[in-house]
Image (spheres, rainbow, N blue to C red):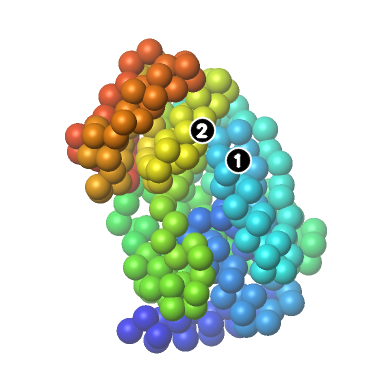
Amino acid sequence: MANRKLEKLDTILKDLKSFVVAFSGGVDSSFLLYRANALKKPDVIGVTIRTPYIPKQEIDEATEFVRKSGIPHEILDFDFPENIRSNPVNRCYVCKKTLFTALRAFARDKGFKYVVDGTNADDTGDFRPGLKALEELGIRSPLLEAGLTKNDIREIALSDGLTFWDKPANACLLTRIPYNTEVKDNTLKMIEEAEYMLLEKGCPGVRVRVHGDLARIECLPGFMEKIVNSPKKDHIIKDLKKIGFRYVTLDLEGYRKGSLNPEK
């Protein structure tokens, strides 16, 4: 089944001819860019958008991937869009509309015909208002069009020997802050520093959700016990308080995608 989907993806990419890949460095956009490059398409470029709410580690990993792969790549820098400073419920829609409008302008100026993104077939079942913005802007989503799910993508990436095949899912730092809460630059820095610290202590894929001066840690399966029973637990608490949090909690439900979404 996955092979048929992959064949469909290749057909879509060939038919698109020239395009810009919105490249975040995550599994989906990395696989999409890798596959386009594997088809020996010279008229493809990965473009990464750098904003204050994208973790620096994601940008660094994206840059390292294209460097090793020899794929053309550019980074576009953006200040924090003030129209999402209050973290509204339609934040993702407004953000996508703003950033992908800029990507369309980049593509037009550089002579590329399309802009494509890494939306996959699983993404339509979640609360994702940003998908509406992509549709309105005419952004193509080849993975979705080919019917490839996240598991399909990981399996193919593993079989192709791609090191990112099991990379935990990530999302912009705004998803760690409740809706309708003013986003402060210092809060974003605290979240990024906290999650990187936990990664360094052996806990990948964590989310540090912020509720005032309280840090609520969501872990992937198996890592909750690791934190609770770890001799590093006291160091984790100390480090989080040093970062600026007053209270530290461990969410007993663990990591849930979109746990701050309205219906949750």
Q: Position of residue 96 (x, y in %)?
A: 54, 46
What crowding class fits label 2: few (fewer than 14 Cα within 10 Å), some (14-19), or many (20 or more)? some
Q: For residue 259, which numbered disc appears in the image?
A: none
- The three-letter code of the residue at mark 1 reads Lys
Looking at the image, is 240 positioned above or below residue 34? above
Q: Position of residue 87 (x, y in %)?
A: 46, 28
Q: Quadrant of the N terminus?
A: bottom left
Q: CA distance from mark 1 to mark 2?
A: 8 Å
Residue drawn at x 38%, y 13% as measured from the top left? 246
Q: Residue furthest front?
A: 231
Q: Quadrant of the C terminus?
A: top left
Residue drawn at x 35%, y 30% as measured from the top left? 232
Viewer can see residue 163: yes
Find residue 233 and report its image quarter: top left
Q: Nearer the viewer, residue 145 or 202?
A: 202
Residue drawn at x 41%, y 53% as measured from the top left? 168
Task: Give the residue pinned by disc 1.
Answer: 56
246 left or right, relative to 54: left
167 left or right, relative to 216: right
Q: Position of residue 41 (x, y in %)?
A: 69, 79
Marks 1 and 2 in Cβ contact (< 8 Å) = yes
Viewer can see residue 183: no
- Dot 1: what SS? helix
- Dot 2: what SS? helix
What crowding class fits label 1: few (fewer than 14 Cα within 10 Å), some (14-19), or many (20 or more)? some
Residue drawn at x 44%, y 48% as measured from the top left? 170
Looking at the image, is 5 positioned above or below residue 232? below
Q: Nearer the viewer, residue 90 or 71?
A: 71
Decide which of tag 1 and tag 2 comes sooner along the chain.
1
Looking at the image, is 130 positioned above or below residue 1? above
Q: For residue 192, which numbered disc appears in the image?
A: 2
Q: Position of residue 224 (x, y in %)?
A: 25, 39
